[in-house]
């Protein structure tokens, strides 16, 4: 077995309600969905976030969109209007979850999602006054 | 309230059996009204403007504390200024949640905006009754939950401080009633986000109040549209850098058939992208159990929906199933928690992280020596683990971060104390042992403290809230 960060095989999105953060991760096909369903348990996610998530983590499945949804209680420092955190709504927790490494079949080793190509952004920035 | 949508309502914009086009023109208070022109150019029938996040009500509460005539989202006139000319031509109706915790004041602003544009004859409706602040003691006694905290189960009398606002999430019914009364603009306070979009579907297609699958379909459409750019390539974790013209992201449109089948799309002449990924990512945004998405109008099973990428920035959504709504509304009750301040200082290489941690300790000790009581401290190390916490992993001593920002945040009981804490950071510019501390712009610690609010979510019986729900319609003269 090889190890791979979820980043290489999943998209993600996080949302907030009160002191609860939900993070959904999205596979792109049946095989990947079955793999994350087996590997990415609620317990594993709870351990990954450590002291950041004070309460329990509950996992839900949405097989119609190849997704797992993790509902993390006590995850936002008391909730948006109460929290001292800069990221008081947990906007970045989706990215934090896909740092998690899981066991994958050997033939998946080295799988890699494309990295950003920012030629368009560089062109805009380079043309700004003062550059 | 006694308002049930009639089986075949009259006065809709749509010829029976036609698809209706609904746009999500706003996703939060502070979003851009420039979205409106592009959406109206597409000929949308309804423009829904969702402005109220949980945090927004807290902001509006602070606004209302300063001025009783406020408490609504004050960008409403900007949106209406862009939309009302098309409304007056009869092609579009607008449904904003801009009322916040003061819908009457928002309606006043809407009428003033219409009048300033010379658009007399427009009918502005206001939905009232979501504000349950004045009834809390009665509701705590009468409602089946006792207003116990939904998460912790604590009894309502454990609310740590006096409530500052209390709003129930209403459903689509009062909006449908306003449309039935011929409203061109329907201003609401707190309604469930998706209900804004569901209401015109119910009204135009004549869906029955217990046609659960149809109500779930309209709710799903609303859920996909209520966060503006998030379903058209905004906040997107896929290949986000390939989204066309991200500086000019359009906002989404749904074409909803009478049977609830919908196509999610966007204005053609614009940037952004609608595909299977941008839509399915939004499906689970702020959702807990996707097989039982609770809203005031229906319990929707989002896992039963089928998504088909039709190409050309069109995704078809169909087959979603619903079941009977619950007998309760969710309500949010806010209470004061304390005052927060923050300071940010930056450190350069070498040992930037260590310098930041030492400064945090020195700062906290200075605050203690100054006799300033702090109830809660938070120290974040930007560039190390401020966002990711334990998920960021340990710092490798052989690859120390080239620079680190320390963000210190604190909570105090007293506002003035919170302000004075920040001033203890300033002298460290020259007096702290770690070399290389520098201020972060204007944020060395001199900012004004901000109020922290706790949110107490609770369930409240619909039967106790509905009698207080009212729809008023006023014609602009």
Image (spheres, coloured by chain):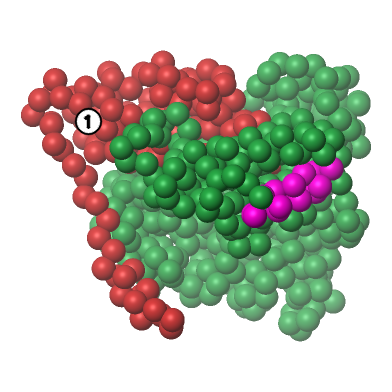
Chain colours: A red, B green
From this view, report whether residue B16 is shown above or below residue B413: below
Label 1, secondary structure: give it: strand
Q: Residue at x 48, y 33 (%)?
A: B389
Specify the farthest residue to the left: A107
Is residue B136 left or right of B397 when viewed as pictured?
A: right
Quadrant where the C terminus of chain B sits is: bottom right
User: Quadrant location of residue B421?
Assistant: top right
Chain letter of mark 1 equals A
Report x, y in % for residue B379: 60, 37
Dot 1: few (<14), some (14–19), or many (≥20) neighbours within 10 Å? many
Is residue B445 left or right of B291 when viewed as pictured?
A: right
Magenta span includes B422: yes
Q: Nearer the viewer, residue B413 or B265?
A: B413
Q: Can see residue B138?
A: yes
Report x, y in % for residue B462: 75, 30
User: Quadrant location of residue B465?
Assistant: top right
Magenta span includes B237: no
Q: Residue at x 66, y 31 (%)?
A: A78
Is residue B103 left or right of A115 when viewed as pictured?
A: right
Bounds of the magenta segment: B417-430
From this view, report whether residue B266 is shown above or below residue B264: below
User: Quadrant location of residue B312?
Assistant: bottom left
Q: Residue at x 57, y 57 (%)?
A: B438
From the image, tell me which residue sits under label 1: A4
Q: Nearer the viewer, residue B396 or B240?
A: B396
Q: What secondary structure do most residues of the magenta stretch adopt? A: helix
């Amino acid at each position: 077995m090889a190890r791979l960060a979820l980043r290489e095989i999943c998209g993600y999105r996080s949302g907030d309600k009160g002191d609860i953060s939900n993070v959904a991760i999205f596979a792109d096909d049946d095989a990947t969905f079955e793999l994350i369903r087996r590997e990415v348990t609620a317990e594993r996610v709870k351990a990954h976030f450590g002291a950041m998530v004070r309460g329990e983590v509950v996992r839900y499945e949405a097989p119609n969109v190849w997704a797992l949804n993790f509902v993390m209680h006590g995850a936002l420092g008391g909730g948006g209007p109460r929290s001292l955190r800069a990221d008081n709504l947990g906007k970045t927790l989706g990215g934090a979850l896909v740092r998690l490494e899981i066991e994958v079949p050997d033939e998946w080793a080295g799988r890699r999602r494309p990295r950003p190509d920012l030629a368009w952004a560089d062109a805009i920035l380079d043309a700004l006054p003062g550059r | 309230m006694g308002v049930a949508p009639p089986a075949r309502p009259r006065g809709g914009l749509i010829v029976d059996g036609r698809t209706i086009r609904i746009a999500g023109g706003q996703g939060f208070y502070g979003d851009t009204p420039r979205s409106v022109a592009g959406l109206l150019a597409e000929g949308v029938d309804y423009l829904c403007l969702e402005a109220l996040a949980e945090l927004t009500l807290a902001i509006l509460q602070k606004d209302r504390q300063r001025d009783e005539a406020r408490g609504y989202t004050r960008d409403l006139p900007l949106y209406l200024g862009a939309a009302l000319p098309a409304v007056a031509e009869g092609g579009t109706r607008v449904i904003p949640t801009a009322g916040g915790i003061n819908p009457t004041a928002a309606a006043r602003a809407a009428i003033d905006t219409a009048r300033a544009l010379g658009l007399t004859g427009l009918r502005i409706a206001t939905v009232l009754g979501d504000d349950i602040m004045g009834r809390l003691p009665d509701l705590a006694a009468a409602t089946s939950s006792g207003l116990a905290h939904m998460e912790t189960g604590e009894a309502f009398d454990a609310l740590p401080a006096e409530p500052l606002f209390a709003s129930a999430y209403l459903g689509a019914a009062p909006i449908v009633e306003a449309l039935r009364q011929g409203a061109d603009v329907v201003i609401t306070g707190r309604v469930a986000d998706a209900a804004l979009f569901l209401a015109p579907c119910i009204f135009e297609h004549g869906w029955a109040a217990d046609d659960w699958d149809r109500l779930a379909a309209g709710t799903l459409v609303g859920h996909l549209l209520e966060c503006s750019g998030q379903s058209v390539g905004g906040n997107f974790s896929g290949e986000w850098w390939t989204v066309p013209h991200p500086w000019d992201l359009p906002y989404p449109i749904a074409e909803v058939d009478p049977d609830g089948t919908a196509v999610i799309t966007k204005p053609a002449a614009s940037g952004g992208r609608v595909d299977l990924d941008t839509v399915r990512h939004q499906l689970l945004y702020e959702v807990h159990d996707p097989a039982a998405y609770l809203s005031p109008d229906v319990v929707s099973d989002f896992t039963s929906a089928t998504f088909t990428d039709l190409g050309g920035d069109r995704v078809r959504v169909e087959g979603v199933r619903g079941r009977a709504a619950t007998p309760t509304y969710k309500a949010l009750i806010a209470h004061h928690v304390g005052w927060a301040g923050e300071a940010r200082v930056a450190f350069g290489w070498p040992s930037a992280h260590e310098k930041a941690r030492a400064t945090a300790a020195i700062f906290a000790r200075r605050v203690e020596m100054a006799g300033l009581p702090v109830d809660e401290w938070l120290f974040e190390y930007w560039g190390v683990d401020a966002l990711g916490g334990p998920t960021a992993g340990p710092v490798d001593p052989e690859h120390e971060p080239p620079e680190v920002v320390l963000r210190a945040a604190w909570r105090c009981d007293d506002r003035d104390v919170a302000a004075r804490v920040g001033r203890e950071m300033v002298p460290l510019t020259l007096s702290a042992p770690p070399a290389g501390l520098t201020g972060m712009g204007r944020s060395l610690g001199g900012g004004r403290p901000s109020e922290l609010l706790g949110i107490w979510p609770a369930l409240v019986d619909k039967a106790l809230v509905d009698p207080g729900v009212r729809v008023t319609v006023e014609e602009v003269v």
